[in-house]
Amino acid sequence: MPIKSFAVAMIDALAHSLRSDPNVVLIGAHSFLSDRGLRPEDERALWDAFPDRLIDPPTSEGVCTSLVTGAAMAGMRPFLNYGTATFAFEAFNQIMSEAANVSLMSGGQLRAPMTLHMFAGIRGGGAGQHSSSPQAMYANSAGLELVLPASPADAQGLLRSAIKSDNPTVVITHTRLLSMTGEVPDGDFSTPFGQARIAREGRDVTIVATSLMVREALKAAEALAQDGVEAEVIDPRTIIPLDTAAICTSVRKTGRLVTVDEGNALCSIGSEIAALVAEQAFDALKAPIVRVARPPVPIAFSPPLEAYVTPNADKVVAAVRKTMQA
Amino acid sequence: MPIKSFAVAMIDALAHSLRSDPNVVLIGAHSFLSDRGLRPEDERALWDAFPDRLIDPPTSEGVCTSLVTGAAMAGMRPFLNYGTATFAFEAFNQIMSEAANVSLMSGGQLRAPMTLHMFAGIRGGGAGQHSSSPQAMYANSAGLELVLPASPADAQGLLRSAIKSDNPTVVITHTRLLSMTGEVPDGDFSTPFGQARIAREGRDVTIVATSLMVREALKAAEALAQDGVEAEVIDPRTIIPLDTAAICTSVRKTGRLVTVDEGNALCSIGSEIAALVAEQAFDALKAPIVRVARPPVPIAFSPPLEAYVTPNADKVVAAVRKTMQA
Amino acid sequence: MAFSPRATLARMLLMRRFEEMVITLARVHKLGRQHLAIGNEALGAAALMQLADGDLIYTTHRNHGHMIARGVDSGKALAEILGRAGGLCGGKGGTWHMTDPALGFQSTSAMVGGSIGLSVGGGFALKHRKTGGVAVALFGDGALDEGIAYEALNIASLYALPVLFLCENNSKEGEAQTSRLATKELTAVPRALKIVCASVDGGNPKAVDRAVGAALAHVRGGNGPYFLEAQLVRWPGSHQIVHEFTTGVTDVTAAWDKAKASNEHAEWQRNDPILRFAHDMIACGALTREDVVALDADANAMIAKARTFAEASPFPKPEAALAGVFV
Amino acid sequence: MAFSPRATLARMLLMRRFEEMVITLARVHKLGRQHLAIGNEALGAAALMQLADGDLIYTTHRNHGHMIARGVDSGKALAEILGRAGGLCGGKGGTWHMTDPALGFQSTSAMVGGSIGLSVGGGFALKHRKTGGVAVALFGDGALDEGIAYEALNIASLYALPVLFLCENNSKEGEAQTSRLATKELTAVPRALKIVCASVDGGNPKAVDRAVGAALAHVRGGNGPYFLEAQLVRWPGSHQIVHEFTTGVTDVTAAWDKAKASNEHAEWQRNDPILRFAHDMIACGALTREDVVALDADANAMIAKARTFAEASPFPKPEAALAGVFV
Ligand SMILES: Cc1ncc(C[n+]2csc(CCOP(=O)(O)OP(=O)(O)O)c2C)c(N)n1
Ligand SMILES: Cc1ncc(C[n+]2csc(CCOP(=O)(O)OP(=O)(O)O)c2C)c(N)n1
Ligand SMILES: [Mg+2]
Ligand SMILES: [Mg+2]
């Protein structure tokens, strides 16, 4: 299988979509395509192939969202890239009150097959306004699918599914994943929503991690294996829909749960997974659940301060140790 | 103690604030004051007393938020009422990226002593765009205090604290609470943040409920008492800061937890409370935690459909029965 | 299509009788809020009757009139307002979110500024597919307070999208004001953004017909968006949020019987687009009094039937609340 | 306060040497992104040197020049950009969020449109307290793409707030374009909203001084907001997001030594506000070549000291990440 970067895998998913469906357009093309590791000739070829379908709009996140929602209802299949995730907050009402409601409010007569993509996460020097990991806010919505790819292959396959989906879909990419490389199947393929990936099998503890944190969880699992602790690492891949069965099955096997998500701790993806397990697999639990997340503070600029609040493999190891001891 | 409606108690808190501090202004005055059950002469007296400080701004939620943030940094103590909570989504970036970051980003040099108030909840015919209960999204932020009053006395005391607080504070009022009446202490008083209220004592199960759901939880507790089940009902009152000790203490006593919040289930306040207890009071738990929340769907208009997804006392009773049986 | 006084008045009467029926049903069925379009009939009818298959329509909280003007089934519309299974959206949308895709209606947004934002997406799709269709954004003057409206006007102009921005300006300074713009000229901002603009007396169906005709010709001609402000006189029963039925059931004979129009709402009756139009058409000989009475009787009969249909329609099954979110 | 060529050039040179030092430090310390204000010196210096105690300033991602122009300690500013404890915000804000409340700076927002929104809050507070102060919003042309800018202009005009909107327009159509307005005239929308507007050559400090002086007089006189567009020539190293140091360290002698200004960046050097101003001041006899060289040496010396301070400043303690969120 070819080795690709996460960024190029995403671009390939988009290119496949552009080629196979004339209704696909990319709004916010520049920050999705440029400086993402494509060979210059490949990037140029893309711009040349779809001159009317790669668009750099005004810095107007609100109406760009309305535009793709309106276009989607009218039969297109637009893909909007916001750049940094906080910029999408400018469009929060257009996402939550318009896009998410289209289907139910119309009694199922209208659809909004659109993809909303944003770059998120603590990225190094992003400071207060460029470091958000807002996945839980989207998970707390109603009417949106939510996708958090964690590997190049999934970046390509999940993005392809997102574009093909007839529902409004939010895809959040951690900035630090863009340069990750990995094997990606050849050609045009898609990865189904709602199927977790068991990133590593293990018998002692279940670690449910998302996005960049899957990498940290796997690093932690390697370290723990040195001490004979075998962690199972689950990557849900999509939060809406969520593969609750895979999570509960794993916890039933291991009896222990650690969650790892980079968002703010309160009402986070980690909170949800923990609550789910405390509800549905309580009897299998042998020890307290432990969550790894960022503390609920805005991110400070200074590198040591940023590092201090960023979840990472060391913190996962510590969390696992804590639940193993209990 | 005088009996007051929730709405009038809120207005009294604001009136005390206006009188005691010339830096307090109310933006969005009409929907905060009018048709809220004040005697007409009292309402007129308020408008007359503060002609420049009760303001009805343009329908521009974004800049109204920027305005109160800028004014707060410059030393004022503004109160912004959005009306329906979804309208505040128009200002989400101004809340999350500006207001919430003022203090940390400036290294503590600047403060944003401002209150952001919104009416939320499934209210009867609100349909997709006027029924949101977005508390979890604000709880997942960083840099905002979050207040969910559930009784007239708390409405007055917590609102007074919110206005006095030097931090940006979000206050969410369930529309259906406005007509609730209850005893409210005389005069100007404030209720501290971070102190849960034990709304009812009990030994068999802990119910943590917020906002309107406190009333439903109490109703459920009365019904359960008929069957000899004594539920303890905890109202956290503020989510940021959260009185984790009160919640854990109660669960240590009862060994069982049911959470009740009207927001969407995924990554909700209920998820957070459940996760917290599964982390910090796991050993005391005798049975699975059960969450009562709205399913993650946009609210349909039709009354029986709306009722079907609205959390209420009956659903709380069922949840308690479930955890008691386990 | 030539302007037909008879068809237009018929449609306007249907719109009026529909809204009056909503008031009745709101009392009978204890409904919550609706935003009625009484007073907006001339604009709605004369504008929406001109649209063609494939045109897309985006409307607001004050959408009833637009639905009826475009020819939506009034029974299904009333059923939707009652939350019934036979309603336009199966009862899921209600008064604020009615839609009828077969007639070009897209998601109806009750967010101020919502329709104007979504309309540029419709325009974008129509332009991309070169269908020759027009996206019509209907919105109140209040929408222009919102940044989303500005962004939408800008992007429509920038990309020369086929959008007709149709603003129903019912603001009068003071109590009933629904917008707070620093300029009194609603066309100032769209004009600054290089959009061709015009204003029209929204109470005069003939003027509206002409103005909308010109606007549609401009947009269909590939000349980019057009902004038309329709100046409306606010119905006294229409308050910012809720209505009060202060003027009572409309009596069409007041169009000629001056004695009937001398109560406390005389000014309203002088401006009521229906009475005004009926009066003018009778005066110029296009219609007779008997025509008007007959048209009104038809409208009343249709709305009575619509009521029967709506009230007979069952509520949807509660579990339907969970269905239809995702495909 | 009369315009002083010497003081103004000194401040401009300090701004330039500061940004050049940021480029050096970014390499040495492997910093991420900064948005440099090279090319914006004339506007920044001539505008911000005129502000008074009690005026409030709101700036953007491109804030360094504004800080230095207003007289903020350059050592503390560099330390902030390095994330050090001795920085303006103790290292917590970094390049995008520097502030210095003692000099009137309020929260610096890197959200496009952020500063313009917050500034009306400052204006609101100043008006409420009748201090006679002015809130100054600095922002790029790109901010006018955002709905929040429109809402801010509207509310400032509506309430006659004492706000000076100062737009640094560095857009040229094509690659370097940072705004996508349907009109080429940036003052069209504020003018439509009844705000008094003017445009000025932002590369000419004297013109800026005059224009800002007039604008401040208008605002301080209680006449409501004012919108001033400063037209800037974009430094070739300035790309939309990141900079490239294509033009090398500025050589002030190129202001008179034409041979030095004939490389591939000749056009830039002709427009470089520092070289241009130095050239003009020498030509009219206000300054000598030696003056310019001496002023530049002073600037370099100050920035060298600033660097020493910044690099000597320790990083904050990691746990500081959790402190200072709430009072
Ligand atoms: C984003 C948003 N903010 C506020 C409201 C509350 N609201 C409902 S109707 C209305 C007035 C709208 O005025 P206009 O658009 O002129 O329409 P009109 O009711 O006058 O026909 C407002 C502010 C809303 N629905 N959406
Ligand atoms: C809300 C928001 N959207 C997008 C961005 C990304 N962004 C950073 S700088 C920039 C261009 C800004 O142009 P302008 O305001 O003219 O300032 P300039 O950089 O040209 O000085 C953009 C779009 C942002 N920071 N904030
Ligand atoms: Mg209006
Ligand atoms: Mg610019």
Image: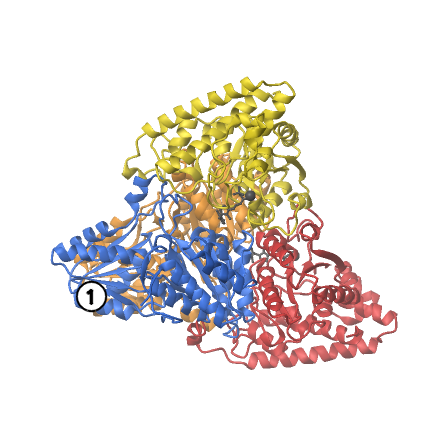
Chain colours: A blue, B orange, C red, D yellow
Percent x, y for residue B37?
A: 52, 53
Q: Nearer the viewer, residue A178 or A114?
A: A178
Q: Nearer the viewer, residue B249 or D156?
A: D156
In the orientation shown, which residue stands out farthest toward the right? C284
Q: How many marks?
A: 1
In the orientation shown, which residue stands out farthest toward the front? D259
Query: Mark 1 — residue?
Result: A201
Query: Relative to A256, is C72 on the left or the right?
Result: right
What type is the residue that disc 1 sits on? Glu
Query: Relative to D296, is C215 on the left or the right?
Result: right
Q: Quadrant of the C terminus of chain A?
A: bottom left
Q: Secondary structure at mark 1?
A: loop
Q: Nearer the viewer, residue A89 or B275?
A: A89
Q: Quadrant of residue A144?
A: bottom left
Q: Nearer the viewer, residue A1 or A144?
A: A1
Percent x, y for residue B199?
A: 31, 54
Query: In the displayed structure, would residue A204 be above or below residue C147?
Result: below
Residue B310 visible in the shown view? no
